Amino acid sequence: FDAATDSGDKVAATPWTWTHTTTGSDMSMGLSIQWWDNSGAITLDVPTYNSVNLTLGIEIKEQGYINHADVHYLASPASGANTVSVAFTGGGSYGRAWSQTFSGTNTTTPLDTTASKQALAGGAGQSITTAIVTNNDNSFIVDCGSSVSSGAITAGGSQTALTASSRDGNASRRATTTAGSYSNSWTWASGGNPMAHALMAINEGASATAKRLAILGVG
């Protein structure tokens, strides 16, 4: 893991911009975006870092089609302090976005796999749990959970949560070991609105694998 930053809370705004500083080698960026299309006419433009387009991992809308959870990625992001930009067409949006960078990744094929889920509203303590099945060892899982106006949001125990949005969304990261199934979850204190959850796994790079195996005395 390298660094995590975010846009701060946004209210009917476009673009959302902030500075993210990237250091290290064999880097990849994961970008999680919680955004709200309350007019039915807003679309998300392609987000950028240092004016370079990120690639969509997966997007999911909750069943009311207002609240979105997206994850995007970028291999070999520019080093140093650069601008992340998240913009919208059709009007400004509410929400928050989170950027995270990871060293030792596969910059040729950064994306391992994705998963998503939507769920109906529940009461207090409503939660969503989504499984993602990684194909490769030692992937990094990046996610975004979203449910507008459903109270404080808490991540599952194996996740490192970032700073929650005032719109009751958040992002997290999670390191894995062996390839297989991993479940991430989010729980909302008060509940009452549909939920959306987007996840992706970023591949470990060959150099990081070699270093790890050397430390273990394998290979």
Image: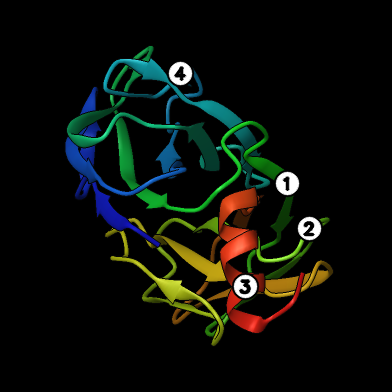
Q: Which mark is residue 136?
A: 2
Residue 29's image quarter? Answer: top left
Amino acid at pointer 4:
Val
Amino acid at pointer 1:
Asp
Q: Name the element at disc 4.
A: loop
Looking at marks 2 and 1 on the same chain, the residue that comes earlier in the sequence is marked by 1
Name the residue rendered at 54%, 87% in the picture.
157
| Circle count | 4
Left or right for 60, reference 168:
right
Category of crowding for the residue at label 1, using alpha-carbon neighbours closer than 10 angstroms: few (below 14), some (14–19), many (at least 20): many
Eye-nearest disc, 2 or 1: 2
How far apart are the two marked residues, 1 and 4, measured between alpha carbons? 21 Å
- Identify the residue under disc 1: 112
Looking at marks 3 and 1 on the same chain, the residue that comes earlier in the sequence is marked by 1
Q: Name the element at disc 1.
A: strand
Name the residue rendered at 46%, 65% in the picture.
172
Name the spot of residue 151 as percent of width and height, x first: 38, 73
Say whether residue 108 is visible.
Answer: yes
Q: State whether residue 87 is above or below residue 2.
A: above
Left or right for 118, reference 15:
right
C-beta proximity under 8 Å, tags 3 and 1 = no
C-beta proximity under 8 Å, tags 2 and 1 = yes
Looking at marks 4 and 2 on the same chain, the residue that comes earlier in the sequence is marked by 4
Looking at marks 2 and 3 on the same chain, the residue that comes earlier in the sequence is marked by 2
Looking at marks 4 and 3 on the same chain, the residue that comes earlier in the sequence is marked by 4
- Identify the residue under disc 4: 46
Q: Which mark is residue 214?
A: 3
Q: Which mark is residue 162?
A: none
Category of crowding for the residue at label 4, using alpha-carbon neighbours closer than 10 angstroms: few (below 14), some (14–19), many (at least 20): some
Amino acid at pointer 3:
Ala
